[in-house]
Image (tube, rainbow, N blue to C red):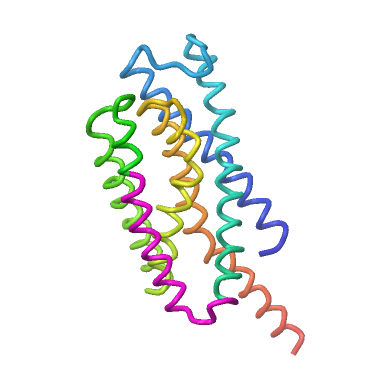
Amino acid sequence: MNLKRCFFLFWSCMLIGAAVSITVGLMMQWTDQSFGFMGLEATGFNALMMGLAGLLIGAFSQMGFFAYLSLNYVALGVLRRQYLWNALQAYTTVFALFVLGYILYMDRGNLNGWMFWALPLALAAASWLVAFVKVKKTNATAFVPTMFLMVVVTSLEAWPAIRGDSNAAAILFMMAPLFVCNAYQILMLHRLVASKTAESAAKAESTV
């Protein structure tokens, strides 16, 4: 990707994060009048703060995404076998889901009783859907890396909310935009890279 496409991905991801944060936050506020953000009670101010938080979450998601791309590059260089790296990612994905459920179970005093099993299952199902779409648009080898990104990287990015003195609403408020931003980036990646490859091929043909 060139700088122009990186810039587009960066700002579009931040805007998606803001939109999802506002949507999720207002839904929580409408269903639970006690839900607030940064101590602000007025809906307008809350929406503004939620949007600003969503911009930061979008930028944070982008950092995690490029960190994963760097990790993927290094891991393939070290292991030198795609199937070994995929096996490690698959194991880590399953392990992360169990760890997430265990952490939420141990913290069930501050959370809803169903959170420890509902969130990992929902995350796994939604990640599978994203991976399924990615495979349809690219190839079967993209399934495991996409699952790893959507489960492991999203969980790590949402770690401050998961391990903090938070409730279920706070975890969902942070994890929902992170998940959507990560899904957007992984589904856009092959399109941006393909566009660059097509442009390079066209330039090469024009010089022949």
Residue 86, above or below 186 = below
- Name the image quarter holding the C terminus: bottom right
- Name the image quarter holding the N terminus: bottom right
Q: Position of residue 153 (x, y in %)?
A: 48, 52
Q: Is residue 98 magenta?
A: yes
Q: Is residue 57 left or right of residue 145?
A: right
Q: What secondary structure do most residues of the magenta stretch adopt?
A: helix
Q: Is residue 90 left or right of residue 204?
A: left
Residue 18, above or below 135 = above
Q: Position of residue 184 (x, y in %)?
A: 48, 51
**Residue 140 occupies quadrant:** bottom left
Q: Position of residue 13 (x, y in %)?
A: 56, 45
Q: Position of residue 182 (x, y in %)?
A: 49, 50
Q: Is residue 79 magenta?
A: yes
Residue found 64% across the figure and 69% down from its top = 196
Residue situated in front as seen by the camera: 15 or 91: 91
Q: Is residue 203 left or right of residue 95?
A: right
In magenta, the rendered stretch is 77-100
Residue 164, above or below 132 = above
Question: Going by the picture, which residue comes out furthest to the right?
Answer: 207
